[in-house]
Every structure is written in C-alpha cells, then in structure tokens.
Amino acid sequence: MTASRTLALTEKLIGRSSVTPEDKGCQDQLIHLLEPLGFNCETIQSGDVTNLWARRGAEGPVLVFAGHTDVVPTGPVEQWSSEPFYPTQRDGKLYGRGAADMKTSIAAMVVACEEFIAAHPDHKGSIAFLITSDEEGPATDGTVVVCNQLKERGEKLDYCIVGEPTSDKTLGDMIKNGRRGSLSGKLTIKGIQGHIAYPQLARNPIHQAAPALADLVAEVWDHGNEYYLPTSWQMSNIKGGTGANNVIPGDVVIDFNFRFSTASTHEDLQRRVHAILDKHGLEYDLQWTLSGLPFLTPRGTLSAAIVDAIRLETGVDAELSTTGGTSDGRFIAQICPQVIEFGPPNASIHKIDEHIELRFIDPLKNIYRRTLENLLT
C-alpha cells in the first residue's frame, strides 16, 4: 500500500458532510473495507447516532482503534478558501472539514490494518474498531453506549488507540496518556432585593459571595501528580443585578468548572465546595454537572509501543501529555486498562480551512501499522 491509498480514503470520508450526529455513510465505507479483512462488523444505532463495533479475532490481547466520523459545523462557508466538504489539495496540504479531526486518522488506521493483516494474516490476539458519530456532540449515544454493551457482554479489551489529533508542532511530538475530568457547577447565591439607598432593608448577594469566591479561588485542590498539573477551579460567568444602578439584586449566579486530575475525585471536590460555601453562611443553590471523569494510562506496554513506532518512523521522541479537553477516551478507559490518544497536529481543528499536511498522512498510517507489529506479532 502507498500513501495514495490512505489519502484516497481520507478524501472519500471528508467528502461526506457528516456534521454531528450525522454519519452520512462514512461507517458503511469502513465496513466495506473491513469485512473483507475478516472483521465482524456490527452497527449499533442509538437515537440519531450511528456506531460501529468491528472485531477481527476471538483471542486476546485485543487492540482497539477508536475514533469518530462526525465533525463540527463548518462555520461561514464563504470564509473557507475551498468547499469544506470537497477535499482540496494545495500548498502541500489537504483541506476539508475533518482533515485533522479526525478522518485522516480513521483512514490511516484502516489502511494500517490492511497492510498489517496482509503481512501477518495469523497475527496473535484481535484487532477491533470502535467508531461513533457522536463525539463532537453531546456524547450520550455514542462511544459510551458501545462501551456499556461491551461491558455487559463481558468483552475484554487490552489496548486502545484513539485517533484524536494530539500532535503539536510536528507529527508524533505529543501523545495523550490521559485527560482531565470536567465538573461544572451553577451556583445561585440568594439575597434580598431592595433599594440601594436602604441597604439595611436588603441583603446584597454579590457582597456575600465575594469572600466565598475568594476562598474558592485561593483553595489548593490538589498538587497534581507525575502526569497532571494541579486541579484548577475557574469561574466562567457571573450574572447579577437588574440592570438598574439603584437596585440591590435578589441573587447572583456564578458558573464555574473544575478540570480535575486523578489526584482528586469529583465527590471530594463537591464536598469541599459545599464546605466553603457553608462556612460563609450563604443561602444558595448549587447544581452540579459531571461531563467526564479523568483517566490515566501510566507508562507501560501501549505507550512504549507507540513511542517506539513514532521514533522509528519519524525520529521524534514523543512527549506524554494529559493536557487539553475531554475525549471519548474517558468512556473507553472504564473498560480498557490502557488508552492512548495519538493523531496528527491539532493547530487547525474546528477552524476555518481545517487541514493536514500531506507529508504526515503516510507516516501516520505507518506508525499505526508499526504499533500493531509491536503489540500483535
């Protein structure tokens, strides 16, 4: 197989306008390629979301390639230099929505499997694909649904490579061996509305909130660990007041978020926030939303296999990182002990004129193939 094989498949996938939660036939294209390789392909529909679970082999260890066929909306099409769903090559780059996030990764994974199976038809263990069209959306009918089904079936997974665009300056310089959790809160501190000239007849919730917020900002939630920076508490919005300058408001609403590491639990963070608020004697309502748990894959078999493959293919020494937002790795980590994210540079993801450099496409496929060789031969 040559680079043109991966490029051609990438272009076919980009050409399908699979804006989340639409798949637009991307997974049918994958099934068409995977079934002749001996994969048993199962489509799992949940609401408007299309999921694919494909597996070749019945023995362990099981190496899973995971990714998503859905993409974010294009934004103003007129601001693109070329049609976002018409893959276009220029200046050494391939342009199109999904080029970096993450249709090139999916194409590279499939072609890597084609090459690996051709060379090692009797490889040990099993290869699987877990593909969803719900990663860029609410993520309630996608990977989490498949993982729950696999858990109920008792299927054991050993390694998972998520094709998220993790590289920074060049292909392979960064892989993700974990992600922080995300815990949000909507805090309403209640006061008594009144005339600003008669503060003794009112209770200003903004004034009451200030000392508690200062304590929340100053609190050291944890010290992180070898892989994570300390947990961060950040306010994103504060809304209080009626718009008039002579009215003490009746409440103030604060939106905040924790990006927390494996050094903390969401239960402990919630308990400590309530303790600080209670210490200040506030009358309040607090609604919590847990959108993702942190996960961590310490240095081990999978990270070593990928780091070695990257070094052999590119000469780059990959850095392990846990920075960035959440991903579907948080769901897979609940049923798979080793989860690593690795894909192309992420500088253009979700942007106008999203692209990938053509020179990275073939090496990305080769790194996935080398990783298969490291783990399943």
Image (tube, rainbow, N blue to C red):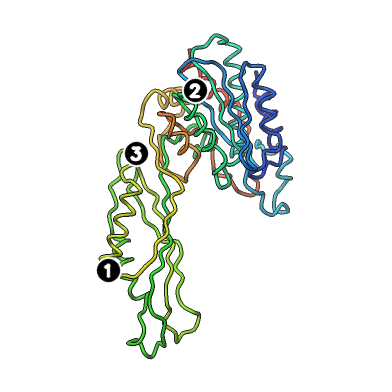
How far apart are the two marked residues, 2 and 1, measured between alpha carbons?
51 Å
Badge 2 marks a residue whose secondary structure is strand
Distance between mark 3 and mark 1 Cα atoms: 34 Å
Give the mark nearer the N terminus: 2 vs 3: 2
Q: Quadrant of residue 198?
A: bottom left
Residue type, label 1: His
Residue extending furthest toward the top: 122
Give the distance between the C-alpha atoms of the residues marked 2 and 3, in whole angstroms: 24 Å
Q: In which quadrant of the rendered image does the N terminus lie?
A: top right
**What residue is drawn where x is 36% and y is 79%?**
204
Q: Secondary structure at mark 1?
A: loop
Q: Which residue is painted at 59% across and 41% down in the image?
A: 134
| Residue 88 visible (yes or no) | no
Q: Which residue is mark 2?
A: 63
Q: Residue 319 appears in which quarter of the rendering?
A: top left
- Outermost residue on the left side: it is 279
Tell me where residue 292 appears, x and y as whole percent: 44, 45
The residue that mark 3 highlights is: 227
Q: Which residue is mark 1?
A: 280
**Which mark is in front, 3 or 1?**
1
